[in-house]
Image (cartoon, rainbow, N blue to C red):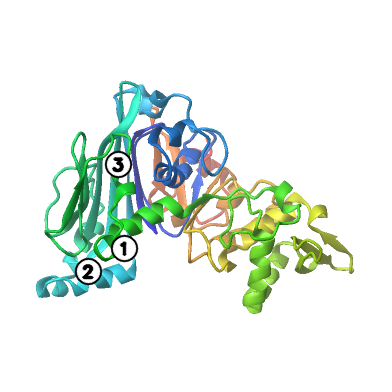
Amino acid sequence: MLTRIEAFHYRCFDHLDINLSRFHVLAGANGSGKSTLLDLPLLLSDLLQRELAAAFLEVPRIAGKPRTHSLSELIHQGKGNYFGFAVEVELPEHLKRQFLEGATAAVARDENRQFSKLRYELRLELFNHQLQVGGEYLWLMANKVAQAGGSWGIGGQRSQPYWKSLVERDAGREAVFREDLNSRGKTEINLPPDELALNNIPRDLRKYAASIGIRDFLGKGSISYEPSWDKLRTASLPGQSSILKSDASNLPWLLLNLKKQDLDLYTAWEDHVKTALPHINSINVVERADDHYAYFKVTYNGGYEVTSSGLSYGTLHIFALTVLPYLLNPPTIICIEELENGIYPKAIESVLQSLSSVYDSQILISTHSPIVLAHVDLEAVIAMRNDLNGAVQAVSGDQHPMLEDWQGKIDLGTLFAAGILE
């Protein structure tokens, strides 16, 4: 899970620094940086899947429009020649145990010195109109510094024994890859300036499990979830992926497999959908006999049936959003922009109950709807606003000075005064 994300001199952010948990709603007016923040996990994934410039100038892997048509536009207010990112990720339990088993007796007795997180830092620079790596670092963080939340920046010296460098790459220098447990074991590789070191970790899980783990987590686990009405209304072809697609086109197959493998879980999802759509009696997924395509067949109270092609956008959108906590193999990070679109206000509560109950994934949502905000806890809100210098700030709702006394009621005056909706 991403526990912290930072952006330095990137687009609307001079310095973004926000701590994350499992579920967040990014709230703010148009132009307040919600989409830019929501895109950061997806951008890191693209950077690890393709060339640096292509991640910005070409259509993202998840579809949509290019992030920019000019690399200079990526630098905050056009000042300087660099921008960067840093993310902190919870260390998986099996790796925590591995490091603890290989630790000295003194470390085993001192929780402050036991590793619990990974921190990846990346600085990108414009040089002769070309984008290149200006610095790239991966650190193991012990509990003492992981919980401190200090302003570490990108690169620089870190105090041992609370930090351990796994990847170190300064501009113009070789990339150094250090083994997880062997303090002397390392590999040095000379890389092109437009190629990430994290993409070139030696493929040896025995020695580089932590580095490989964060590369796979950042590179493969994020999706921008935008269910497509056209594709959901069309029967889903066989042989689909067992992992949810960003357009939800394989949703019928995921639910058909869920029904076969865990009928109780499928029934629980069906019952939850009925809290948002009480006129539905049952939801079935049918595999067509002649070509093995799969589609929905919904029976309404009164006995009439409607298949996928006749279902409304709102109904299919509710199916696609409420299913997330019931999936057997969900993506690790799911980003959803303006989920309220096409959903009747009374159904939003049911959708948010599902999204806030996804324990195997991290859910990040953007909204400018006070109805959505009325149904989430204050600590789940990230308020987006512009400061006096034109940079965007992101503030956790429970730390926002104007929202200390807000108790979940829709109070547009308070929301506007706090800068969430203005």
Task: Check whether the beta carbons of the residues at disc 1 and disc 2 lie within 8 A of each other.
Answer: yes
Q: Which mark is residue 18?
A: none
- Nearest the viewer among 155 and 4 is 155
Q: Which mark is residue 91?
A: 1
Horizontal arrangement in the rendering, residue 171 relative to residue 331 (left or right): left
- Nearest the viewer among 170 and 75 is 170
| Residue that badge 2 annotates | 99
- Foreground tag (1 vs 2): 2
Image: 144 above or below 16: below
Disc 1 and disc 2: Cα gap in Å? 10 Å
Residue sitting at x 58%, y 66%: 327
Disc 2 and disc 3: Cα gap in Å? 25 Å
Horizontal arrangement in the rendering, residue 195 relative to residue 49 (left or right): left
Horizontal arrangement in the rendering, residue 81 relative to residue 408 (left or right): left
| Residue that badge 3 annotates | 122
Horizontal arrangement in the rendering, residue 91 relative to residue 365 (left or right): left
Q: Determine the residue located farthest toward the top in the rendered image.
A: 128
Amino acid under label 1?
Leu
Amino acid under label 2?
Phe
Disc 3 and disc 1: Cα gap in Å? 19 Å
Task: Give the secondary structure at mark 1.
Answer: loop
Amino acid under label 3?
Leu
Point out residue 332 in the picture as x, y percentages from the top left corner: 47, 59
Name the quadrant containing residue 325.
bottom right
Q: Earlier in the sequence, mark 3 or mark 1?
A: 1
How would you rate the neighbour count of disc 3 (Cα within 10 Å): few for under 14, some for 14-19, many for 20 or more? many
